[in-house]
Amino acid sequence: MFGLTHTMHTYHSNPFWRNKSLDEMTSQEWESLCDGCGKCCMIRLEDEDSGKIADTNIACKLFERTECSCTDYARRCTLVPDCVRLTPDNLGSLDWMPKTCAYRLLYEGFDLPSWHHLVTGDRQSIHEAGMSVRDRTVCETEISSETVENYIIKWPGEG
Ligand code: SF4
Ligand code: SF4
Protein backbone atom coordinates (compact mmCIF):
# COMPACT_ATOMS: atom_id res chain seq x y z
CA MET A 1 0.00 0.00 0.00
CA PHE A 2 1.43 3.35 -1.03
CA GLY A 3 0.53 6.66 0.50
CA LEU A 4 0.54 9.78 -1.59
CA THR A 5 1.58 13.05 -0.03
CA HIS A 6 0.40 16.17 -1.76
CA THR A 7 2.35 19.23 -0.74
CA MET A 8 0.94 22.46 -2.03
CA HIS A 9 3.38 25.18 -2.95
CA THR A 10 2.47 28.62 -4.17
CA TYR A 11 4.46 30.22 -6.93
CA HIS A 12 4.52 33.42 -8.94
CA SER A 13 3.77 32.87 -12.61
CA ASN A 14 4.34 36.55 -13.40
CA PRO A 15 6.22 37.99 -10.43
CA PHE A 16 6.38 41.73 -9.91
CA TRP A 17 10.17 41.81 -9.92
CA ARG A 18 10.16 40.54 -13.52
CA ASN A 19 7.38 42.68 -14.90
CA LYS A 20 8.01 46.00 -13.16
CA SER A 21 11.03 48.26 -13.18
CA LEU A 22 12.45 49.20 -9.79
CA ASP A 23 10.87 52.64 -9.87
CA GLU A 24 7.44 51.19 -10.72
CA MET A 25 7.32 49.04 -7.58
CA THR A 26 5.14 49.87 -4.62
CA SER A 27 7.00 50.57 -1.39
CA GLN A 28 5.84 47.18 -0.08
CA GLU A 29 7.24 45.39 -3.14
CA TRP A 30 10.46 47.39 -2.88
CA GLU A 31 10.95 46.50 0.79
CA SER A 32 10.11 42.85 0.14
CA LEU A 33 13.08 42.55 -2.22
CA CYS A 34 15.60 42.76 0.62
CA ASP A 35 16.76 39.20 1.26
CA GLY A 36 18.14 39.99 4.72
CA CYS A 37 21.67 38.86 3.84
CA GLY A 38 23.09 41.56 6.11
CA LYS A 39 26.18 42.08 3.98
CA CYS A 40 25.45 45.78 3.43
CA CYS A 41 25.45 46.36 7.21
CA MET A 42 29.11 45.32 7.49
CA ILE A 43 31.97 47.81 7.71
CA ARG A 44 34.04 48.03 4.52
CA LEU A 45 37.70 49.01 4.46
CA GLU A 46 39.38 51.04 1.75
CA ASP A 47 43.04 50.37 0.95
CA GLU A 48 44.79 53.75 1.20
CA ASP A 49 47.20 52.88 -1.62
CA SER A 50 45.08 51.02 -4.16
CA GLY A 51 41.65 52.36 -3.26
CA LYS A 52 40.35 48.77 -3.25
CA ILE A 53 37.39 48.06 -0.99
CA ALA A 54 37.52 45.01 1.29
CA ASP A 55 34.58 43.41 3.06
CA THR A 56 34.77 42.65 6.76
CA ASN A 57 32.56 40.81 9.21
CA ILE A 58 32.46 43.85 11.50
CA ALA A 59 28.81 44.73 11.89
CA CYS A 60 27.20 48.12 12.36
CA LYS A 61 26.29 48.75 16.01
CA LEU A 62 22.55 48.41 15.21
CA PHE A 63 22.89 45.04 13.50
CA GLU A 64 21.44 41.95 15.20
CA ARG A 65 23.74 39.08 14.30
CA THR A 66 21.34 36.12 14.36
CA GLU A 67 18.20 37.77 13.01
CA CYS A 68 20.43 39.52 10.45
CA SER A 69 18.40 42.68 10.74
CA CYS A 70 18.55 46.28 11.85
CA THR A 71 17.35 46.78 15.41
CA ASP A 72 16.01 50.27 14.63
CA TYR A 73 15.17 50.31 10.93
CA ALA A 74 12.86 53.33 11.18
CA ARG A 75 15.53 55.55 12.75
CA ARG A 76 18.57 53.96 11.10
CA CYS A 77 19.66 57.01 9.10
CA THR A 78 19.46 59.24 12.18
CA LEU A 79 21.25 56.87 14.51
CA VAL A 80 23.86 55.85 11.93
CA PRO A 81 24.42 58.86 9.64
CA ASP A 82 26.39 56.89 7.04
CA CYS A 83 23.68 54.26 6.68
CA VAL A 84 22.53 54.54 3.07
CA ARG A 85 18.82 54.49 2.23
CA LEU A 86 18.55 52.61 -1.07
CA THR A 87 16.42 54.09 -3.82
CA PRO A 88 16.07 53.27 -7.53
CA ASP A 89 17.99 56.52 -8.16
CA ASN A 90 21.10 55.87 -6.06
CA LEU A 91 21.61 52.16 -6.85
CA GLY A 92 23.75 52.92 -9.88
CA SER A 93 26.29 54.83 -7.80
CA LEU A 94 26.64 52.23 -5.03
CA ASP A 95 29.25 49.96 -6.56
CA TRP A 96 30.19 48.59 -3.12
CA MET A 97 26.79 46.92 -2.74
CA PRO A 98 27.08 43.12 -2.49
CA LYS A 99 26.93 41.30 -5.80
CA THR A 100 24.16 39.06 -4.44
CA CYS A 101 22.02 42.01 -3.28
CA ALA A 102 18.55 41.63 -4.79
CA TYR A 103 18.39 45.34 -5.61
CA ARG A 104 21.73 45.26 -7.39
CA LEU A 105 20.84 42.08 -9.29
CA LEU A 106 17.58 43.52 -10.60
CA TYR A 107 19.20 46.89 -11.36
CA GLU A 108 21.82 45.08 -13.44
CA GLY A 109 19.18 43.07 -15.31
CA PHE A 110 19.53 39.73 -13.52
CA ASP A 111 16.80 37.62 -11.90
CA LEU A 112 16.56 36.82 -8.18
CA PRO A 113 18.66 33.84 -7.04
CA SER A 114 17.11 30.45 -6.33
CA TRP A 115 17.52 30.90 -2.55
CA HIS A 116 15.69 34.26 -2.41
CA HIS A 117 12.60 34.17 -0.16
CA LEU A 118 10.34 35.55 -2.90
CA VAL A 119 11.31 32.51 -4.97
CA THR A 120 11.24 29.90 -2.19
CA GLY A 121 8.48 31.37 -0.01
CA ASP A 122 10.74 30.91 3.01
CA ARG A 123 12.73 33.66 4.77
CA GLN A 124 15.12 31.04 6.12
CA SER A 125 16.25 29.76 2.73
CA ILE A 126 19.00 32.38 2.40
CA HIS A 127 20.49 31.30 5.73
CA GLU A 128 20.19 27.62 4.87
CA ALA A 129 21.99 28.31 1.59
CA GLY A 130 24.83 29.97 3.56
CA MET A 131 24.38 33.26 1.68
CA SER A 132 23.85 35.52 4.68
CA VAL A 133 26.16 36.77 7.43
CA ARG A 134 24.10 35.11 10.16
CA ASP A 135 26.14 34.39 13.30
CA ARG A 136 29.39 35.23 11.53
CA THR A 137 29.85 38.83 12.61
CA VAL A 138 31.33 40.89 15.42
CA CYS A 139 29.91 44.21 16.52
CA GLU A 140 31.92 47.36 15.77
CA THR A 141 31.64 48.34 19.44
CA GLU A 142 33.47 45.16 20.53
CA ILE A 143 36.71 45.59 18.64
CA SER A 144 39.66 47.93 18.63
CA SER A 145 40.17 50.13 15.57
CA GLU A 146 43.80 48.90 15.33
CA THR A 147 42.66 45.37 14.58
CA VAL A 148 40.08 45.99 11.84
CA GLU A 149 42.25 44.36 9.17
CA ASN A 150 41.96 41.06 11.01
CA TYR A 151 38.29 40.98 10.12
CA ILE A 152 38.60 41.17 6.34
CA ILE A 153 36.49 38.40 4.83
CA LYS A 154 35.24 37.14 1.48
CA TRP A 155 31.52 36.49 1.73
CA PRO A 156 29.92 33.72 -0.35
CA GLY A 157 28.85 35.05 -3.72
CA GLU A 158 31.22 38.02 -3.60
CA GLY A 159 34.25 36.32 -5.19
S1 SF4 B 1 22.73 43.63 0.57
FE1 SF4 B 1 20.76 44.10 -0.38
S2 SF4 B 1 19.53 42.27 -0.06
FE2 SF4 B 1 21.25 42.14 1.38
S3 SF4 B 1 20.51 43.08 3.30
FE3 SF4 B 1 21.47 44.69 2.09
S4 SF4 B 1 19.81 45.66 0.92
FE4 SF4 B 1 19.07 43.66 1.65
S1 SF4 C 1 21.78 51.33 10.74
FE1 SF4 C 1 20.70 49.40 10.45
S2 SF4 C 1 20.37 49.23 8.22
FE2 SF4 C 1 21.94 50.80 8.56
S3 SF4 C 1 23.92 49.71 8.40
FE3 SF4 C 1 23.32 49.75 10.58
S4 SF4 C 1 22.24 47.81 10.94
FE4 SF4 C 1 22.31 48.17 8.70
Image: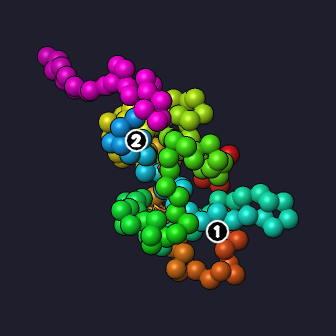
Q: Is residue 61 above or below residue 97?
A: below
Q: Is any atom of residue 71 visible in this view? A: no
Q: Is any atom of residue 61 visible in this view? A: yes
Q: What residue is rendered at 57% in x and 47% in y?
A: 90
State left or right for residue 116 relative to residue 42.
left
Whether the magenta-drawn stretch holds residue 6 is answered as: yes
Say which of 101 and 138 sits in front: 101
Distance between mark 1 and mark 2 Cα atoms: 31 Å
Question: Which sits earlier in the primary sequence, circle 1 or circle 2?
Answer: 2
Q: What residue is rendered at 78% in x and 64% in y?
A: 47
Task: Please give the range of residues in magenta.
Answer: 1-24
Q: Circle 1 is placed at which residue position?
A: 151
Say which of 108 and 155 sits in front: 108
Q: Secondary structure at mark 1?
A: helix
Say which of 118 and 81 sits in front: 81
| Kind of residue at badge 2 | Trp
State left or right for residue 127 relative to residue 152.
left
Q: What residue is rendered at 51% in x and 41% in y?
A: 88
Circle number at residue 36 = none
Query: Looking at the image, what colour scheme do you see?
Result: rainbow
State left or right for residue 142 relative to residue 62.
right
Whether the magenta-drawn stretch holds residue 113 is answered as: no
State left or right for residue 57 relative to residue 31.
right
**Magenta-drawn stretch, dominant element (helix, strand or loop):** loop
Circle number at residue 30 = 2
Residue 35, horizontal then vertical, whole percent: 43, 46
